[in-house]
Amino acid sequence: MNGIILKGKFLHPDPLVRAKELRNRIASFSAKIELFDDGVKAYVNRDFHLATTKFLKFSKYFNAREVMNNVGLSYYRLARRIITGCEGLENSLEPAIKLDYETQAKKLILDMPEQLVAAEKSLKCRKDPDFIKFMKESNRYLLTAALKDSKHIHSFINLSAYLITSGEYNSAIKVTEKALEIEPGNEYVLNN
């Protein structure tokens, strides 16, 4: 398995593995979005039983705040029907309620192809001969600076940035930990 490993625990797959996995998940997930839309349609048509069922099915794939809101609201509307008929409240004012008509899942699905294209473009750029040459030179000089002075925080900040850009995450973590020993709380180190 390729990716970030810290203290023997796998933390994150490498970009190519992530991109492939995301493409597969998007394909299977985009069909599930219809469950949310069907729930909204059922709610608008006052079929709160069906709305609840659709929202609950969708929540198994995307358990977000707007989905939980709509499930709760659908159950509320079912309960309200009972109490309204029971207590003769047909003409009373109902407290304000608000359905979520959109889910963040749609935004994720719609934006994801652009993000994947950008990631794939980035991977192609990393094969550029000039990029490779400049990165090798960067590594050489940053290592030299760190070796010349093991307390020079800038060298360790820059070396960790180089390692992150190189995809050498385990090494970047080690260098960042060393930088935090030199200067705990340094905002540049914490950013990396």
Image: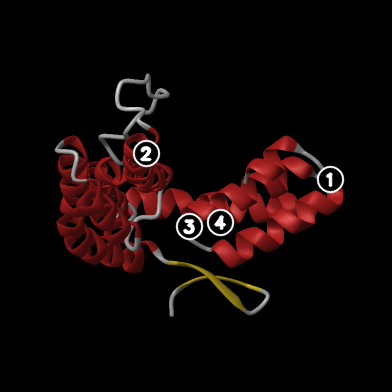
Instruction: Give amino acid for label 4.
Output: Leu
| Image point (31%, 35%), residue name | 100
Quadrant including the N terminus: bottom left
Dot 1 or dot 2, earlier in sequence: 2
- Marks 3 and 4: CB-CB under 8 Å? yes
Residue at 36%, 40% in the rendered image = 86
Point out which mark residue 163 bears: 4
- Amino acid of disc 2: Arg
* Badge 3 amino acid: Ser
Mark 4 neighbour class, 10 Å CA radius: few under 14, some 14 to 19, many 20 or more: some
Name the residue nearer the viewer: 135 or 173: 173
Q: Are marks 4 and 1 in contact (CB under 8 Å)?
A: no
Circle 4 SS class: helix
Asked if the residue under mark 2 is in contact with the one under mark 4, i.e. CB atoms within 8 Å, the reply is no
Q: Earlier in the sequence, mark 4 or mark 1?
A: 4
Give the mark nearer the N terminus: 2 vs 3: 2
Q: CA distance from mark 2 to mark 3?
A: 58 Å
* Mark 1 surroundings within 10 Å by alpha-carbon count, few (fewer than 14), some (14 through 19), many (20 or more): few
Give the foreground label among 2 and 3: 2
Q: Could you tell whether 35 is left or right of 154 in the image?
A: left
> Badge 3 is on which residue?
166
Q: Nearer the viewer, mark 1 or mark 3?
A: 1
Depth order, front residue of 135/45 = 45
Disc 1 target residue: 184
User: CA separation, marks 1 and 2?
Assistant: 56 Å
* The disc label shown at residue 80, or none: 2
- Mark 2–mark 3 contact, CB under 8 Å? no
Q: CA distance from mark 3 to mark 4?
A: 5 Å
Other residues around mark 2 within 10 Å, as few (<14) / some (14–19) / many (≥20)? some
**What kind of residue is marked 1?**
Pro
